[in-house]
Amino acid sequence: MSDSITVYVPRDSAALAVGADRVARAIAAEATARGLSVNLVRNGSRGMFWLEPLVEVLTPSGRVAYGPVTTKDVPALFDTGFLQGSAHALHLGLTDEIPYLKKQERLTFARMGITDPLSLADYQAHEGFAGLRRALTLAPTEVVQQVLDAGLRGRGGAAFPAGIKWKTVAATPAEQKYIVCNADEGDSGTFSDRMTMEGDPYMLIEGMTIAGIATGATKGYIYVRSEYPHAIAALNAAIGQAEAAGFLGADVLGSGKSFSLEVRKAAGSYVCGEETALLESLEGRRGIVRAKPPLPAIEGLFGKPTVINNVITLATVPIILARGADFYKNFGMGRSRGTLPFQLAGNIKQGGLVEKAFGLTLRELLYDFGGGSASGRPIKTVQVGGPLGAYVPESQWDIPLDYEAYAAVGAVVGHGGLVVHDDSADMSKLARYAMEFCAIESCGKCTPCRIGSTRGVEVIDKITLNKNRPQHEKLLRDLCDTMTNGSLCAMGSMTPYPVLSALNYYPQDFGLETPAEKAA
Amino acid sequence: MNDSTEIARSIAATHKNVPGGLLPALHGIQDALGHIPKDSVAAIASEFNLSRAEVHGVITYYHHFRSEPAGKHVVHICRAEACQSMGADALLAHASKTLGCGVHGTSADGVFTLEPAYCLGMCASSPAALIDDELHARLTPQSFDELVAQARSAT
């Protein structure tokens, strides 16, 4: 065979964690041994993690997938002719036809797993930098207006309109302004930021550059958690290449506008995902939450006007500029415009990334995409929106995933993480863990969070040990009320979400009567 | 003044004029020395023109920084909800027994340190662990033991 065949083995860290590097080495060695020429591309992940390592082969009819592949499978794959896309027990057909992918609406994640993350040529062949090029033809106010018109809300969890932050920073005069990317993705059940940084880093670079041009900021920081070493390495490599090619630096694409980026490594503090704590940490201090006002948009990093947005928020800006605000806002429902990369995690058979327009239901995600629990047992509950999100019971699985519809039932969509638990889950234990996590991660500045979380653990222990159970249930509710209304930031004020939802929907796990038993 | 203090001072000096440079300096020191020795705090503080209390406060605030040396291999096991739903609590208990040390502890032979992690971003492939710099997902007690044996034999 004279022509080299292209084989893709993902470099996403979730693929590496199940042996993707070993599989890539085995494929290269086997090809050499057989005298075959293989062009091995380390792509991002398609986001179907139960199939990782997912190996793809480029054939005349398209990319054909095999997975999950182990090193032991490699000789047999060659024997059956997988380089021609032949049948094999691990053969999954054309990747694009896999229902899990085909049913999605990938806007932000359009390139994910398709391109080589560090190839500028690949990026540009797939609409990369089209948004930046268009932004450079517009007045800065028009760029901000596009983001406003698209209805893009903060994807980190708070869902604040991104355009409002941008408009405020643009309108605040200062000799230096900053764009800060919050990449401190600490929520359990979430990995969309990580996938973006590892699998499509130029998209984030492009989004931040557009934000800089729109607001007059010339310097950007990406604050990445220390638990994400592969994301840090990918970003640093991508920034270096983007600078060398003129997409970043003193003269962005010959526009005369300057924008530079720097990656900063966090140090394992969950509360630094809160924007003001993050700014304190970037300034080299303990990550203690600041009181607001002043808003970061007016007095942010080093006291200067600062746009601070989550990875997905910034990474979604390029497609809004490239295709226009109308294109983007036509996805979604109500005030939740566009798409959200949902992350199916925990005890789920087909865990992974599902980007869909707002408005689908949890039941669709759990069964149509997820295929039910991994253990095969009935699903008991789903924690939506990270460790500070509510446990959503089955009675609410048909509510559309929309910021307002979820808020109406005391839940949050947050960063779009869904952690599935089967019927073996003990909700009193999970409620206790929520308080314990808050006690570990509280920055300590406000009393309800610092002290309340420790008292919360103790009170839940007393309830489960049946020490004055009715009184302690009342005390726990009272404590949650104080934390909700008296805490300085979401750490303390939202820890009651998982605690109270567990208590309200699963009282039997605390040894309490269910509403039906009470009525009887 | 010992060697490690001099290394810490020189790393701090390269970051002292960087805006918000203390965290990058502390990362650099820990990467070079494996921990941030208590007796280097004064040198770091003097480079940054901060008080020792301020530097101590920053080091002890962040879970990532350690003031004492770790074992030869550091094992982080994720304790967060997604991993819990797939048996992380049992895995942590098993790891503690296999390694012979509790959480935040180091085994008597100094080979392993066990730390909790609160999310490694492997939430669709739980339970997950980080052994030194290498991520591992979909772990079972058996596969964990194999990884530990590999690390031990590489010691």
Image (cartoon, coloured by chain):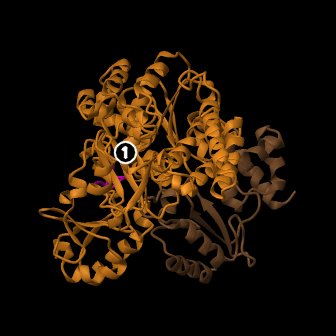
Amino acid identity at mark 1: Gln
Chain A tint as drawn: orange
Residue A375 position by quadrant? bottom left
| A77 versus B116 height, above or below | below
In this picture, residue B81 sits left or right of residue A82: right
Chain identifier of the residue bearing label 1 in the image: A
Q: Is residue A267 visible?
A: no
Q: Residue at x 30, y 29 (%)?
A: A334
Along the line of sight, the residue nearer the viewer: B68 or A124: B68
Chain B tint as drawn: brown
Q: Which residues are magenta?
A: A112-120
Along the line of sight, the residue nearer the viewer: A208 or B131: B131
* Residue bearing the label numbered 1: A396
What secondary structure is marked by label 1?
Answer: helix
Along the line of sight, the residue nearer the viewer: A186 or B48: A186
Where is residue B94 drawn, in percent x and y? 60, 75
A119 is within the stretch colored magenta: yes
Residue B149 position by quadrant? bottom right
Q: Residue at x 70, y 62 (%)?
A: B34
Where is residue B115 drawn, in percent x and y? 64, 63
Where is residue B66 drawn, in percent x and y? 72, 57
A291 is within the stretch colored magenta: no
Q: Is residue A373 visible?
A: yes
Residue A481 position by quadrant? top right
